[in-house]
Amino acid sequence: MDFFSIILLAVGLAMDCLAVSVSKGICAGRFRWRDALRMACLFGLFQGLMPLAGYAVSSLFAAQIKAVDHWVAFGLLGFIGGRMIVEAYKPSDGACAEAGGDRAGRHYTWGSLLVLAVATSIDALATGVIFAPYPEWIAVAVLIIGLTSFLLSLVGTAIGTAFGSRFHLKVEVWGGVILILIGAKILVEHLFFS
């Protein structure tokens, strides 16, 4: 594990946050700092803390998985990345309810954002397992993953409100590809260079 890999991992994990933020921005119709910051803080917090939770659980079994940790990392990141790619091409309901009241505010309620924060961070929970053999990197990873998710959530909200539904970028695909490549890198480094 190295610093560059952690940055790539953070970007890959944050693609779900970016995609959801763009969607929320499209539905809200206008950018409000209060709403964007609320979502970005929740996304960043959950994305940062979930790997720590995954690491804490997996570190209890670090000795047992040491011999296969590279295969575990490759398998988890490959599965998570593959799932992100598949889900990017699934049809979504895509409908933004526009009836009534404060259209922007309704899309940023604490309850709905909390559900989205948990949903988008499940991948990060599983990713925490790959840090069991690298305890020296977990604090850095938590900080970088949380901060990256926070920033990309803000960017996503701004993109969604600025461009509306005119652009349909499959950012989850790029996130999935990044995660798969990181898993392959860990496997290759362990098998051929350790």
Image (tube, rainbow, N blue to C red):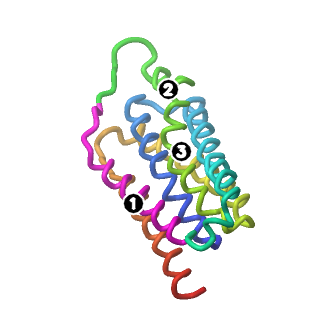
Quarter that holds the N terminus = bottom right
Position of residue 161 measured from the top left corner of the image (x, y, whole percent): 42, 37
> Is 116 placed above or below 122 here?
above
Point out the residue furthest to the front here.
64
Disc sitting over residue 174 in the figure: 1
Query: Which secondary structure, mark 1?
Result: helix
- Mark 1 Cα shell of 10 Å, populated few (<14), some (14-19), many (≥20): some
- Mark 2 surroundings: few (<14), some (14-19) or many (≥20) residues within 10 A: few
Q: Does 90 appear in magenta?
A: yes
The answer to the question of whether label 1 and label 2 lie on touching residues, with beta carbons closer than 8 A, is no
Furthest-bottom residue in this view: 193
Which stretch appears magenta? Answer: 70-94
Label 3 sits on a secondary structure element that is helix
Q: CA distance from mark 3 to mark 1?
A: 17 Å
Cα separation, mark 1 vs mark 2, equals 25 Å
- Does 119 sit left or right of 144 as displayed? left
The numbered dot on residue 112 is: 2
Q: Locate residue 80 relative to residue 40 in the image: left or right.
A: left
Marks 3 and 2 sit apart, C-alpha to C-alpha, by: 14 Å
Residue behind mark 3:
121
Asked if the stretch drawn in magenta spans residue 188, the answer is: no
Q: Nearer the viewer, residue 3 or 104?
A: 3
**Given the image, on which type of amino acid does mark 1 rest?**
Trp
